[in-house]
Amino acid sequence: MDDSIERIPEPKPITYQRSVSFDEALSMTKFGKINYILIIISGTILTSVLLETLGISYVIPVAECDLLLTTKEKGVLSAVAFAGIIASSHLWGFLADTLGRKKVIVPTLILTFTATVISSFTTSFWIITILRFFAGFFISGSSATIYAYLGEFHNKRDGSRAIMGASFVFGMGCLLLPGIAFSVINQEWEYAIPFMNIIYRPWRLFLVVCGLPSLVCAFVLLKFPESPRFVLNQGDVDKTIETIQWMHTLNTNGREAKLRISSIRDEVEAQQTKFRRSESSDTKGITALMKLMWNQTAPLFMTPYLNNTVIVCILQFGIYLTSNGMYMFFPDILNRVAEIQESGLNRTTICNAVYTTQVNIRMLETNLSQTIPECNQKLDIMAYEHSFILELLYALGFAVIGLIINAVGKLPILVYVFVSCGLSAILIIFIDIPLLSVWLYLILLTCGFCISVVNAVTVDLFPTTLRAMAICISLMFGRLGSVVGANMVGLLLDTQCELTFWISGVSLILCGMLSFFIPNIYKRSTSEPRASVSSR
């Protein structure tokens, strides 16, 4: 009788019988815990880049006697990290697009921390210069690749907001930099290490503190999978579905049934990836590596991507020319303005203050051999105050841009920031009210807002197979702008001060005009859905 009882068949799991697109699959994961953690980690990695490149500016004044630095050597030490970034940008872009985003980000973060820690124990200018070069060399791998990694965990609707969210975290991290420097460097202690023949002072500890975010982010990312879009383009659909299911489970805290996706449609760019891999499969060794690098880079400078590449590279160059180039001399110029005000002259332009104080600087340089240099182990509080105000502006600006970028689009943001900053640079030349000039200078330096917006544009303009390389190359041109800008200001400031501000102002306004020529910028700025608070 038991045999006659019909067994009730078990219910089959619900599956999506149709083939879903990758963007649809990401939309099914919801926006939750994983997305927020990735945004925070990405912003922290971007902060690490700032700490490794600009944090040294807090160290140089107080490490002068420990490292026996001359003025020329200070300039070299200030720029050497950017040289490392420029030298490695192409390599990391290639490796990220061929080996994977995570396989580049995690090792380079660990290597950056290692180089930074070792540099804190050096007593030789040349050794610390080499180590700072390698710190920039390695941090370049994660600084550009993280944009592609973050964007590829989000659908088209949320990608730009996620990048701007990471930029907001970056802004908050920058806001903490002056406070960290003040709390660490301005301590009064020292510890002798006889077997290394060094005296460990607060500035050395500050270098280690600047490297800690890199190490922490590396360990956190070990728990995360490779970019699902990259994995899909490599042809591993099953692993892509597994990653998407993992995201959905954690984002919903397991309250919803497991996603059942039968397949994800193979995209055109995935087919392009397979084609490029097959092209070089018949060669081995160095020849294959060089051919792969050529295949990965050449499309960016050919149709249909040449126009996109040229535009984003020019924009990044123009932004960094001012945001970093003019920033390197920001404290020095403010000190000169303060010196003029202390002398009783309250109506003067910034450039007149530079010219007036230059006479005193030359007198000090002439009599340098007759004086005993004083080793300052602390920085003046004014340096921290001005840096704090600038970073506060960045934090607030990134927050506002992140909230409005979907509503107003990228083009209005780019044009507004470029033009307002450019006009501020030109007004500085004529304004003879020092306090107003200083605020205009601060506004000028906020052109760095556009860096993340242009990166978001780059993510939209290039396919997954070329995205990391495109961002790396565009940022390489940006860092080149930093080097050109810093040297330009150093060459012209004392004799042609007005020209430095004219160059910065006009170049930013031209960048604003160039923004109108970004392909499909009008379509993206009007068709993207409005960002909602609940979706975040």
Image (cartoon, helix red, strand yellow):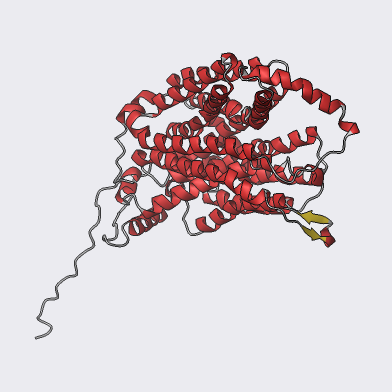
Query: 224 and 319: which one is in front?
Result: 319
Residue 12 is situated, as x and y percent measured from the top left of the image, at 21, 64
Residue 182 is situated, as x and y percent measured from the top left of the image, at 63, 47
Query: 259 and 406: which one is in front?
Result: 406
Position of 492 with respect to 97 (left or right) is: right
Residue 460 is situated, as x and y percent measured from the top left of the image, at 42, 33
Residue lying furthest right in this view?
Answer: 370
Residue lying furthest bottom in this view?
Answer: 1
User: Does 257 sit above or below residue 147?
Assistant: below
Q: Is residue 463 visible?
A: no
Residue lying furthest front in this view?
Answer: 344
Residue 357 falls in which quadrant of the image?
Answer: top right
Residue 130 falls in which quadrant of the image?
Answer: top right
User: Does 152 sit above or below residue 318?
Assistant: below
Position of 332 with respect to 43 (left or right) is: right
Residue 294 is situated, as x and y percent measured from the top left of the image, at 60, 35
Identify the residue shown where x is 73% and y is 56%.
189
Identify the residue shown where x is 62% and y is 32%.
479
Position of 334 with respect to 411 (left or right) is: right
Q: Is residue 382 visible?
A: yes
Tally of numbered tags: 0
Quick one: quadrant of the N terminus? Answer: bottom left
User: Does 491 sit above or below residue 117?
Assistant: above
Residue 380 falls in which quadrant of the image?
Answer: top right
Identify the residue shown where x is 58% and y is 46%.
179
